[in-house]
Image (tube, rainbow, N blue to C red):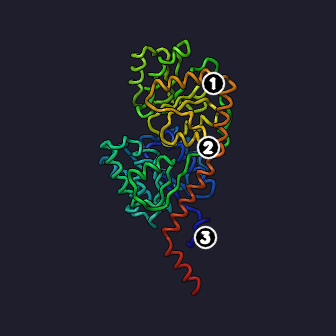
Amino acid sequence: MIARELQTAKLRIVHVFRAPLGGLFRHVVDLAAEQAKRGHDVGMFFDSGGDGPRVREALDRIPGALALGVETAPIRRNPGPSDVRAFARFSRWLKVARPDIVHGHGSKGGVFARLARWSGAPGDPIRAYTPHGGSFNYRPGSAIHRVYMAAEALAARSTDVFLFESAYIAGRYDKFVGVETGTRRVVANGLSEAEFELARADPGAADLLYVGELRAAKGIDTLLDAMPRMAQGLGRLPRAALVGSGPDKAMLSERAAKLGIADRVSFPGPMPIRQAFKLGKILVVPSRAESMPYVVLEAAAARVPMVASDVGGIPEIFGPFADWLGPSDDADDLARRLVACLRHSDAKREQMTADLAQFVQSNFSIRNMVDAVMSGYREALDRRRPREATAFAVHSRT
């Protein structure tokens, strides 16, 4: 296959990741669906513990119903002996799927993708990696961060193409790993045109809305701490709806009780994002660490008023409006910004949300996302196969 043919060839693409949850899963499904629409054969490998009707419903929306199929195995978050069994199953599946591209997502998926060179899969497929934050979100200097960065450096040497989801994560890679190898792209998450439909809060909605995992990295405790501090500026205690699930729900409930605001905080559980937007007037994103969060993109597209932290890739989403963001872990500052947003006139909120939506619509589309991913694959294929192109040229002259 010569270089020109590599640009138009139908590819066999496998996506491997751990948990079919959150933004990572949404990214993989959107990517796979568009790749299938473009005529490529796609398959997936992920943790069997996360499989279920919700996941299968999402996969059923992919054109061609994933031509290379779906395989699962028990995959734990942290490294352990079970990874050996999971990788053995992955290797057997690759021999049947015969992919041209193995694309790993997240830390565990990235490891499996880079190990594909030793799987025995025919043709030595291109190995692509998208971190999705993952190991790069640990606190720099901590023991676990040093261990994971060492592992990233080792795996980098087996990576054909890096597809960083934000400039922020690319910068973290350069600073803490720094191994220069393979092709690289910054490929921001993208939205469909249908997602730019206006969403409005229901009458009687809570003042504040959080949507996402209930865990420490999301900074929800800072939001709870800010709520009593808002009372003076508002003349009352605000109400908050915390939508989602996660390991820290009990801790957050206890914190709300200690702050005397338990009756002002509800936990509706997980639900579709457009349904969640009806439950609150302002979306709060108090995160301590993020890469390129879909909830921020989706809220911007739906013109939902938003108060967010200046962390990770969030400033890239806000672009020229990044000065609206504030520090994480600062309950006083968060309270001040929330009160100010609630006290804005309807006209001012509508103008601010419309401006942000226009910027996001111009810069974060699924089409652009997939174009950039496919460009990265093709460049890696071109770099991998120069001898094949040379052999073709020699043969064509004889």
Residue 146 position, x and y percent, is 32, 47
Q: Is residue 372 above or below residue 339?
A: below
Which residue in the protein does label 2 denote? 191
The local secondary structure at tag 2 comes to: loop
Name the quadrant containing residue 303.
top right
Which residue in the protein does label 3 denote? 4
Residue occupying the far bottom of the picture:
398
Q: Is residue 271 above or below residue 232?
A: below
Name the quadrant containing residue 276.
top right
The local secondary structure at tag 3 comes to: helix
Residue situated in front as seen by the camera: 205 or 76: 205
Query: Quick one: label 1 or label 2, which is nearer the N terminus?
Result: 2
Q: How far is the residue under mark 3 from the one under mark 2?
A: 30 Å
Task: Give the residue drawn at x 51%, y 38%.
Answer: 53
Query: What crowding class fits label 1: few (fewer than 14 Cα within 10 Å), some (14-19), or many (20 or more)?
Result: some
Residue situated in front as seen by the camera: 91 or 356: 356
Q: How far is the residue under mark 1 from the one under mark 2?
A: 21 Å
Which residue in the protein does label 1 denote? 201
Query: Quick one: label 3 or label 2, which is nearer the N terminus?
Result: 3
| Residue 95 seen in render | no
